[in-house]
């Protein structure tokens, strides 16, 4: 990427953004959360995951493939009611969250951008994001608008291989676990409270098939076992996730708007 052009939406003036819209630039919306991540992890973990992947991928595809991708400011609050038994969690009502995301996407389209990628670092946002993306696409059905949402419904082969290598975490994983702790050890180890990493007392041996609250599954907010987390594993996951998002941006870039 040229040093003269930043991928960050907030680094530009209105005139520059108008020019980037005229140049058919992509727009990326990273969606995070502010929620507990156990005793060892900070409450901004999910926001950091979404932000790092989107920024790194946008910079890479612009530099290597000429794909103009702009990253909006991260949406730091999400749908996190299931974590509210733990201090520090801030949640948004799903209906309000849908409205907020719709307003953001509508503003992007109204200023001339036609291709948008949405990515979430928090799985709890996905149902509301599906509704918001569908609503905006329907509202602008008279325009060639394309909104791409990663629904986290498919595990890519490279990640499946990693999962198969990992030790059992008590039959259930997914929050402040080995994977997320490894990601943070690779990215910003100074923020991980290593002395507070411990295996939780899980109250289930598999994820329930009912709508659960986090404190119903664990004694300390962790779902999984972070005790064997390491930075090397985390870096492998970062590299794979960033490369996957690069491919997604390239597919969106080449998508026909006719």
Image (cartoon, rainbow, N blue to C red):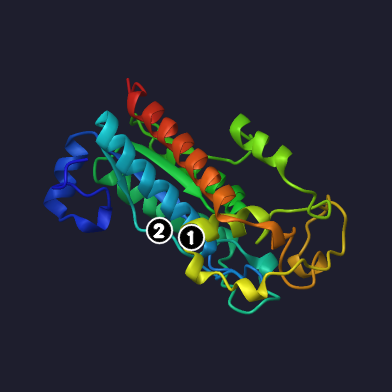
- Please report the residue visible at 79 percent of the width from the left and 53 percent of the height from the top: 172
Choose top left, top right, bottom left or bottom right for residue 115. Answer: top left
Q: Kindly state the secondary structure of the residue where label 2 is placed.
A: loop
Looking at marks 1 and 2 on the same chain, the residue that comes earlier in the sequence is marked by 1
Picture coordinates of residue 141, whole percent (x, y): 40, 32
Going by the image, does 175 lie left or right of 3?
Answer: right
The residue wearing badge 2 is: 74
Q: Residues within 10 Å of mark 1 (few under 14, many from 20)?
A: many
**Residue 117 picture quarter:** top left
Q: Is residue 12 above or below residue 70?
A: below
Residues at discs 1 and 2 in contact (Cβ within 8 Å): yes
Q: Of residues 194 and 135, which is closer to you in this image? A: 194
Point out which mark residue 244 bears.
none
- Inter-mark Cα distance, 1 to 2: 7 Å
Residue 47 disc label? 1
Q: Observer-nearest residue: 233 or 151? A: 233
**Residue at screen point 65% across, 61% down:** 176
Left or right of 249? Residue 69 is: left
Locate residue 2, reporting x and y percent.
17, 42
């Amino acid at each position: 990427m040229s040093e003269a052009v930043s991928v960050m939406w907030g680094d530009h003036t209105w005139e520059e953004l108008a020019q980037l819209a005229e140049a058919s630039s992509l727009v990326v919306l990273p969606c995070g959360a502010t929620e507990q991540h156990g005793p060892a992890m900070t409450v901004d973990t999910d926001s950091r995951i979404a932000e790092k992947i989107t920024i790194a991928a946008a910079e890479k595809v612009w530099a290597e493939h000429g794909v103009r991708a702009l990253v909006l400011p991260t949406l730091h609050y999400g749908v996190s009611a299931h974590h509210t038994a733990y201090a520090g969690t801030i949640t948004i009502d799903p209906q309000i969250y849908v409205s907020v995301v719709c307003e953001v996407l509508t503003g992007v389209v109204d200023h001339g951008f036609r291709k948008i990628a949405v990515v979430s670092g928090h799985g709890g946002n996905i149902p509301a994001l599906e509704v918001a993306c569908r609503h905006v696409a329907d509202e602008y059905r008279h325009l060639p608008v394309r909104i791409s949402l990663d629904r986290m419904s498919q595990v890519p082969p490279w990640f499946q291989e990693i999962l198969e290598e990992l030790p059992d975490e008590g039959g259930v994983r997914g929050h402040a676990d080995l994977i997320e702790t490894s990601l943070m050890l690779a990215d910003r180890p100074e923020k991980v409270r290593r002395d507070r990493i411990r295996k939780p007392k899980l109250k289930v041996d598999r994820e329930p098939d009912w709508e659960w609250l986090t404190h119903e599954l664990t004694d300390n907010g962790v779902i999984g076992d972070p005790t064997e987390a390491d930075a090397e594993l985390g870096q492998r996951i970062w590299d794979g996730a960033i490369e996957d998002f690069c491919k997604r941006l390239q597919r969106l870039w080449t998508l026909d708007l006719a």
